[in-house]
Image (tube, rainbow, N blue to C red):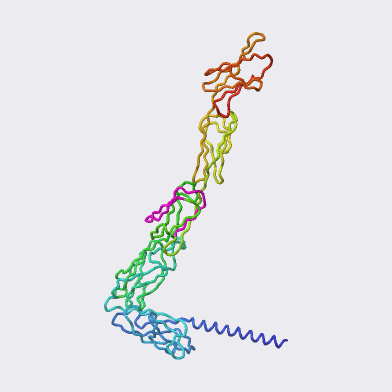
Amino acid sequence: MKKYQSNIFRQTVAMLLMVLAVMCANVALAQTYTLTSSDGNKVSNDVSSVVITASGFDANDGARYALYDGITNTCIGHHSAISNGTISWTVQLNEGNNQIKIYKTKNDSDTKDGNSHGTLTVYRMYATPPTPTGNEQFTVNGGSDGKLDFASAPNGNINSISIAYTGLNPNAVYYLIKSSDSNQSNTSRSITPKSNGEASSTTSAKDGIDLILKIDNGSGLPGQIVSVMHLSQYYPPTLVVNPSTTVCSGSEVVIFARNIGDTYDESAWTVTGGTATKSYDDANHTLTLSNVSAGNYIVTLKLNNGNTLTTTFTAVDATPMNRTISGCWDQLQLNATLPDGFTGSWDGDGVVSKTDPATFINNPNGLYVWTVSNGSCSFQERWEVTNEATGLSDIVVTQTGDCGSATLSVSHNKGVTVKWTVDDVEKSATSSGDTKSSITLTEAGNHSVKVTAGTGGSCPAEKYT
């Protein structure tokens, strides 16, 4: 058992050593060496070649290295061995930027073995200033309109904006200048095109600046402006509901399509959830829904790029309110309904409770209004309450003789109908006029008499004797 455990231990140690060896090898590959030019990083046009020296090698490094053109990816300095910690090559220069990279090579050949170990750019002036193609363009983060989301970036500054260039003169150097640069001849953001006239770079920027692309003036400085892009805040396409996402049935709702650019006819719009009269304004990107029925609406707009915008709103039906009146006179009560999600209030003289759907009124005359609202819309119901105003007086009894007949009479307003009831039996008036009514009783004994006066309403006036 001990021998078995010892073998496992040795195997484990061996594996750890292998991992460490790979890690060390990777560290070696990551080594960066210094490249220098015998004539500096900027030379006149009459300098056609320079000596590039690589230094910083380990004295025990037995590998071979070569130089490559970083733009064309071709070998420009054949594989060479280290001598006294350095390697030197004579390199022919093109006009403009010459991007030079050093690579470790394989098997005594110029074949690259891994990533670059150092980069140097040497600029050679032009005999004749390069000319623009007239087709220079660039995009930022894939877009050609300069719209970026600066609002979401820390301090409103986007640190890494990807720029792609097309239509460049492959034999020219270009420079990206910002309108915010204090030095408008800034050469720190130089661009060297590929043979197909394309290039890429990154930069940082804030909202509202211009990115300016300039072509080299022939001596290593920015010259003619060939393209400009203004950067501004990006606002995504969206649908906006007006006046609110909760409206009353019967209302008009307008859907605004914001930041969509293109125009769309009615076939691009879809509305579900209720009925409404639809009208479209393609130029202003609006859909108007009139006389909407109650329901939960979903509105979609299919964009030309295949994306879909969606918004919703609800139309609430607060009617009917089922108004009723109950009770009589000093106990007259108005009754209304209060829909879910609404608040209500009464308006009118003598209302006991302003907010109770069922409220008594102290003065049964006049106009009473019940209003309900949900903050977006409101409905009203109105009651015209009129006191019947019978003007009915107390019953006056006139008796003739000790045992004769008795006459009972009342006065009242014009237009009032009077009914007499004696001992629970309705009797016809003996005499009646516009403002007076009477009945004569000839039967001996005690009698219960009620007189009722009204205008045909539900709450007549009554008197007893």
Magenta residues span: 276-301
What secondary structure is the stretch in magenta mostly built from? strand
* Residue at point 44%, 67% (across, down): 159
The image quadrant that residue 112 belongs to is bottom left
Query: Can you name the residue that lies furthest to the left here?
Result: 128
Among the 4 quarters of the image, the one containing residue 425: top right
Q: Nearer the viewer, residue 254 or 115?
A: 254
Rendered view: 274 above or below 434: below
Q: Is residue 269 visible?
A: yes
**For residue 274: magenta?**
no
Q: Is residue 299 magenta?
A: yes
Task: Quarter of the image for the C terminus: give it.
Answer: top right
Residue 424 image-quadrant placement: top right
Q: Is residue 9 left or right of residue 70?
A: right
| Residue sitting at x 57%, y 32% | 361
The image position of residue 52, as x and y in percent, is 38, 84
As drawn, the residue found furthest toward the bottom would be: 108
List x then y, in percent, for residue 128.
26, 77
The N terminus appears in which quarter of the rendering? bottom right
Could you tell me residue 319's position as x and y percent?
A: 52, 43
Q: Horizontal placement of 410 versus 74: left or right?
A: right
Query: In terms of depth relative to the viewer, which is nearer, 327 or 188?
Result: 327
Q: Nearer the viewer, residue 294 or 45?
A: 294
Q: Is 55 above or below relative to 346?
A: below
Pick out the residue farthest to the top: 401
Say if 433 sits above or below 225 in the image. Answer: above
Q: Residue furthest right?
A: 1
Count of all numbered marks drawn on residues in the image: 0
Q: Is residue 83 visible in the rendered structure shown here?
A: no
